Amino acid sequence: MTTAIPVQSGSVEAGVAAPGLVRAQRGGFGRFLVRRVLQALAVILVVSVIVFALLHALPGGPARGVLGQQATPEQIAAFEAANGLDQPVVLQYLSFLGRSLTGDLGESYLLNQSVADAIGMRLPKTLLLTGLSLVVAVIVAVPVGVYQAVRRNRAVDYWFSTLAIVAYSTPTFFLGMLLILLLSQNAGLFPAAAPQGNGIAEVLSQPAGLVLPVLTGAVPIVATFSRYMRSSTLDNLGEDYVRTARAKGTAYRDVVVRHVLRNSLTPVVAMLGYYLPVMFGGALVVEQLFNYPGMGLLFWSAAQSSDFPVLLGCVLVISVATVVGSLLADVIQALLDPRTRGGLR
Amino acid sequence: MSALPASGPGQEAPADDVVLRIRDLNVTFTTGSGEVPAVRGIDLEVRRGRVVALVGESGSGKSVTSLSVLGLLPSTARVTGSVELDDGGRLRGVVATPEDQLVDLRGRVASMVFQEPMTALNPTMTLGDQIAEAVLNHERIPRVVARERAVELLRSVGIPDPERRARQYPHELSGGQRQRVVVAIALACEPRLIVADEPTTALDVTVQAEILDLLRELVAERGTALLLVTHNMGVVADIADEVAVMSGGRIVEHGLVEQVLLDPAHEYTRALLDAVPAAPPASAGVAGAVSDGGALSASDRVAVADPADDREIVLDLRGVSLDYRVQGRHVRAVDGLDLTVRAGEMLGLVGESGSGKSTAGRACLGLLTPSAGEVLLLGTSIARARGRARRRLLADVGVVFQDPGGSLDPRKLVGESIAEPLAIHGRDGRRLSGAERQARVRELLDAVRLPAGAERRYPHEFSGGQRQRIGLARALALRPRLLVADEPTSALDVSVQAEVLQVLRDLHEELGFGCLFISHDLGVVHELTDRVAVLRSGRLVESGPTAEVFSAPRELYTAELLASVPTPDPAAQRERREARLRLVSVGAEAPGAAR
Amino acid sequence: MTGLRRFATNRLAVVGAVALAILVLFAVLGPLVHPTEQVATDLGAANLPPGVDGHPLGTDALGYDNLGRLMVAGRVSLLVGVLAGALATVVGTLWGAVAGYVGGVVDAVMMRVVDAGIAIPAIFLLLVLSTIVRPTVGMMIVVLGLVSWLVPARLIRAEALSVRTRDYVVAARAMGATHSRTVLSHVIPNTVGTVVVNATFQVADAILLVAYISFLGMGVQPPTTDWGAMLNDGINYIYQGAWWLILPPGLAIVIVVCALNFVGDGLRDVVDVKGRTA
């Protein structure tokens, strides 16, 4: 959604950046993997520090955060002693880290449920929604981007590019509202309320309700990735190997499908990793708008009611998911490229 | 244009003999700033089994012509005239021909070999598949059969172990081998014509010689015609039967190779040939001691620093080793290098790509710190000097880089760039006033033969050769005692190169600085330098007075390197080639030697 | 001069610049032409359709004139967007330039911090922060700026790394130029274009983020409002067909963000050209 704009406009136009791959090429796959995993662990560590710092930045500290604004100083002191909050900060951090690693994220004080359970119930549904949006988006964005690159600087290219800018300049919630107005209220095609229920199966049993949320989530991804794809394909169309392929009598269409497409997709896969936080941010808004019972909605309700354990638990889980996602994207990208894959042998 | 028997324009030739006929070809590019003509009305014929070279400098239109043969020009090109290819006795036009018909012609009737083997192949497709694709484009045969054919083709272009190679990817091969694969793709459907656009320009000289041998064999064996686009007159002499010289989009001279190269009729051709640095002698020293190609022994080092020479030593490398760190691993780029440069002399540092010569050059500038040994500038170790002392030391060193586009800050006026050393160091220990600086800049521009007023313009307004001269002016602003020139003319056309080298030579004579001249071009080094050091895989192979080393090399590697440089005289080149082949066979018998 | 002309050849960029100018004038000077009451509510005149009682765009649920509200909301959106974008650019540029130029361990540590920041989705972080600190306009600027400096930091680092290896920088170092001289005279002048172009996108980014936070009900508090908050208020009436509460603020956001992106693209055309005259 929002942070996509500078990434997209700034770095991609100068050639899709694939820093992971460049590094991988020099040292072989094994080294690349070890290095990349260590990097991800370092990032998760920094994330945990940030979350821990947020916990302590709460007005009155974590105690007041949990006990509420009405708590008396005596109650707070008792709570702090009980939870080790009177110990040195470093020890507190280590114990926070230890608890997080064992999946103990604390108790929600509104849901009567542990944070881990609350998230565990909703995360799969968010992943489902995000995954569906992503699949729809990729199916649209890849051909559009390739087509634009092949027809570069023609009218159709300009129109698609302009449309893409308009699409990602449109806030997701505004887009959702427009879709509700048009497709639900006026045309009556799809319900405006998302499927409810506890499990994925229940959600999937109401496919009509999924249409608008998935569509709303997919549009900004299409806008971003059609541009990535266009620029990556353009880079590859300018490569010498395209000329070699044409010179041996391969039809242009086959050159694009057999040679260019695969090479253009590889860096875009890595961009997918960088784009994950934006997609999770988008899911939050979509879930709130359509009342979809995922982690975004849980987070939003927690923000409304200052349910801090849930808020911070969600931040931690979503960030770790992002880091792991980018790691996977980089590894897949490295595996797709024979230059890096070679190091495995 | 000189007459060429039965091949010049206007003379009808038997149709079964001509594989390519170009008539009144004009190519114009539409750009943002209007129409730019690239080719203006050329006529050319290529016959079966003949090698026709199309030579010229950058912008002459030779590459555009080669692309138009296969209809591969970009859509911004407007083409008139006719280009016809022989398709089994029938001439088929290429100009204004629908794409599906061109696809049918490409690869089957005529195919192409490109300049840059490192990028010409798809990095994510196996070599076998890339060759098989060429076959499958034109023949309805099972994929398995096409794969077998690919293996055969790899074998025929001299790739060892072709079955295994066919399953590999381009990055697993060296540049020379990749170029062989590109040639295999071009051969896949046995076309009548191969168009080769600078096929050896990106390669080291020894590899260039091998690829030229391969092309010569293929043409002789299969009767394929070859249209060879090149800027290198030595390559022309080595392989071509006929030459067409292009300039400004026109063919200014066309004839048999001996005639054009030895007795050029057009003054442009003459100027071009004059600008080519004379190739070093090839065969004379082969008989000399052929050693095992190891590093220099202690007694050889005498040649590095002649004790009889009492001029001041401005640069002294003592056992310098340099490492690159790649993912935590150390890779040795330069290994125990000893070099000296005395005031007023020019030392050529030659070697092929990856020999470590540029790395050594950077260490001389204090940009890299040796992992062993010492770099002494004017007797002081650059690695140990700090702060002001270091800066004072560097004030006595100038540097010129290879890339004329990258070595000047695009956002600074030329005057500012030239004055940069003055701004950093001042002169004679004091800061210069604006007026003094301007005066010095004008002096320097004059010294490198650029017009006054150039200082108020930006680098992009100048040509490559002019930019290199600006770089030279900047390097000499403080009258340094040492100049490090890293391939300063490698990106330039020969005529421009000759100009820049002349300026360098004149200034060297006038100012008397010591110069470390790093180059892969043995001709240039032969012409320019007093002494030479040959580097291979980071080790010094041999060094000594240039004339001596080049006429009587003591190492097989040096001898082969020298013999690989082609000379623009067909008869002499034939001898060089034979000398080289003899050396290669000697090398093959002595394991651990040259190759 | 040439730069301006090059910008003018990008028609969308010109359209964007004009649209931006109009929107800024609308928000800043609009209330002088069309003065309205935006503090005290008037529940008697709530939810009027456009054109009734001298309300060209109708009124909202609290009886505020919708056109006037659009103007004052625009002031907040634009102000927060521009200042937060500027803050993010300054912080990000310094961070990225230092990491890129110093390199080594310092670079690795600085970039892991950036990676961690980027891994936490901005909206999540902003919602947590707005439950901790009371969201005033000034607070929004600081918080948004501190959340969105990460992307420019990455970009400028890459740029600094690439400029650092150019031959003219290497030549300057070989001439004995000090680090500060190299940075001031070569690295900064050659990255400033990227910074300026990115700043444009950064502002667009910030305007969108403000809208998201306000839409989620965690933005500036009434009676202060911005375009996102107007949409949040209006969504409750979407099924009653009160389109005038939705479309104007929504379109305002789309137009201003589009315009900034078009202008950014145009600026890039100007900056990217290596060879340019003075």
Image: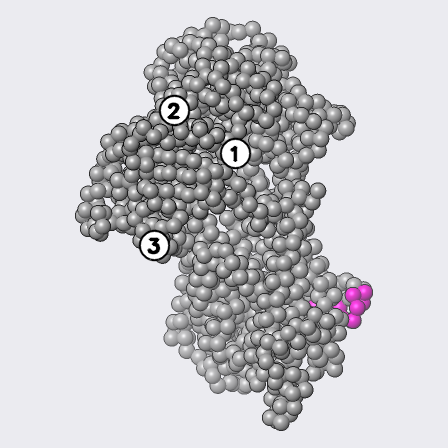
| Image: magenta residue range | A191-202
Q: Can residue B239 be seen in this view?
A: no
Picture coordinates of residue B399, whole percent (x, y): 35, 40
Label 3: which secondary element = helix
Picture coordinates of residue C17, whole percent (x, y): 42, 58
Quarter of the N terminus of chain A within the rendering: bottom right
Picture coordinates of residue A230, whole percent (x, y): 57, 47
Residue underneath mark 1: B537
How crowded pointer 1 is (Cα within 10 Å; few <14, some 14-19, many 20+) is rated as some
For image coordinates 38% across by 71% down, the residue present is C29
Mark 1 near mark 2, Cβ–Cβ under 8 Å?
Answer: no
Residue underneath mark 3: B387
Q: Nearer the viewer, residue B226 or B426?
A: B426
Q: Is residue B399 visible?
A: yes
For image coordinates 66% across by 20% down, the residue present is B156
For image coordinates 35% across by 26% down, the residue present is B530
Residue underneath mark 2: B546
Taking the image as shown, residue A115 lies to the left or right of residue A144, namely right
Question: Tag 3: residue type?
Answer: Gly
Which of disc 3 and disc 2 is earlier in sequence? Answer: 3
Q: Nearer the viewer, residue C81 or A180?
A: C81
Chain letter behind tag 3: B
Chain letter behind tag 2: B
Q: Is residue A193 magenta?
A: yes
